[in-house]
Image: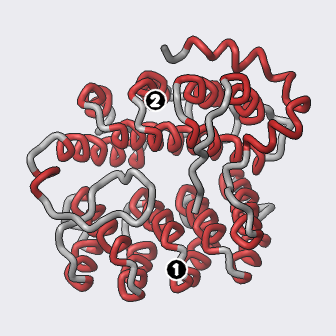
Amino acid sequence: MLDKTTSAVTESSIRNIGRILIDVTQPLKARFRALFTLRNLGGPTAINCIAACFTDSSALLKHECAYCLGQMQDERALCVLSDVLKDQQQEAIVRHEAGEALGAIGSQTSLAVLQKHCDDASTAVAETCRLAVDRIKWLHSDRATSETLSPNPYSSVDPAPPAVEQDVKSLKITLLDEAVPLFERYRAMFALRNIGSEDAILALGEGLEQAGSALFRHEVAYILGQTQHTSAVCQLDRSLRKTSESAMVRHECAEALGAIATQTCTDALGEFLRDDERLVRESCEVALDMCDYESSGQFQYADGLDTVTHSSDTVTHSRDTVTQAGDAVK
């Protein structure tokens, strides 16, 4: 799990971390660690630094930037996320994550842009926007306060609340039923994650292999990584190896294996470092760094503050790009 960075830091330090994030000469794993440091620090300067990265060539990194902005739950990020969602030049996985991030922030002001893209040409974007609309409407309804929900044992802001139902068999039926609205299936998914028993994990594994929606399968892979349950390794490994599977799903399987971090996971990730899909091979690179972190005893994954303290001179050439992005959020 990623630890929160809690110490007070200067604006200069935050900008230095931002320079690592946008520096294309830095290893991708270092840029990811910088990104999660910025997410944990929060605030307008961190948002500006993350926003500056949406011109990068890596869809993986940009998608993770959108994810982090959503997790920060700061309405000052709404403008940049809306722009990314609307930008047809951005990869579908990046636009999808921007839509999900708008749902995570949960502002009713985002409903218009989300509803506009509920019939997007990209199925993943369209489904994401429908889910985000459903989440925002749920969040601002009486149900959000009246329903008794299982606690989320993780720090994530999820695209749907968990279902009220707690019976694994019933939740599995809902999870796998293609006739059930996607939002309700997501609710079953997160309820199973929160339960976290082996039966619940195996039910999720069936969702990874059987669901018709690539978006749904990728979300299952993500939460299996959250649980770090070794019972999920077999299904994740199979989906990663399935080259006919959507790259969006395979990339999420790779990152989930990195979070679980057994030797089997490490071996599988190493095999796909030269995958034909850039999204997959970059995910394997980052996931192997997560494996190293999980087995190292390091205090935290988001170690950007330590990096800028010891090597700030290596990132000064990116100063202008971050400074120019400073006006993006007020």
Where's residue 29, x and y in %?
A: 76, 51
Along the line of sight, the residue nearer the viewer: 48 or 276: 48
Report the number of numbered marks. 2
Residue at horizontal 49%, vertical 63%? 222
In-front residue for pair 65/247: 65
Query: Taking 177 as reference, is 182 above or below it?
Result: above
1 or 2: mark nearer the eye = 1
Q: Name the element at disc 2.
A: helix
Residue 104 occupies which quadrant of the picture?
A: top left
* Contact (Cβ within 8 Å) of mark 1 with mark 2: no
Q: In the shown orientation, is residue 18 left or right of residue 185?
A: right
Residue named by callout 1: 229
Q: Earlier in the sequence, mark 1 or mark 2?
A: 2
Task: Please tell me how crowded label 2 is: few (under 14), some (14-19), or many (20+) other residues with Cα within 10 Å.
Answer: many
Query: Would you say 7 lies left or right of 266 here?
Result: left
Residue at x 57% of width, y 11% of height: 327
- Name the residue: 37% across, 36% down: 102
Q: Say whether residue 43 is left or right of residue 166.
A: right
Q: Which residue is mark 2?
A: 81
Residue 268 location, quadrant: bottom right
On screen, residue 6 above or below 276: above
Dot 1: what SS?
loop
Amino acid type indicated by mark 1: His
Given the image, on which type of amino acid does mark 2 rest? Answer: Leu
Residue 328, x across and y down, in percent = 54, 16
User: How far separated are the C-alphas under marks 1 and 2?
Assistant: 32 Å
Residue beneath the point at 78% across and 44% down: 306
Residue 224 placed where, x, y %?
Answer: 48, 71
Residue 230, image x, y percentages: 56, 83
The one of 239 and 159 positioned closer to us in this rendering: 159
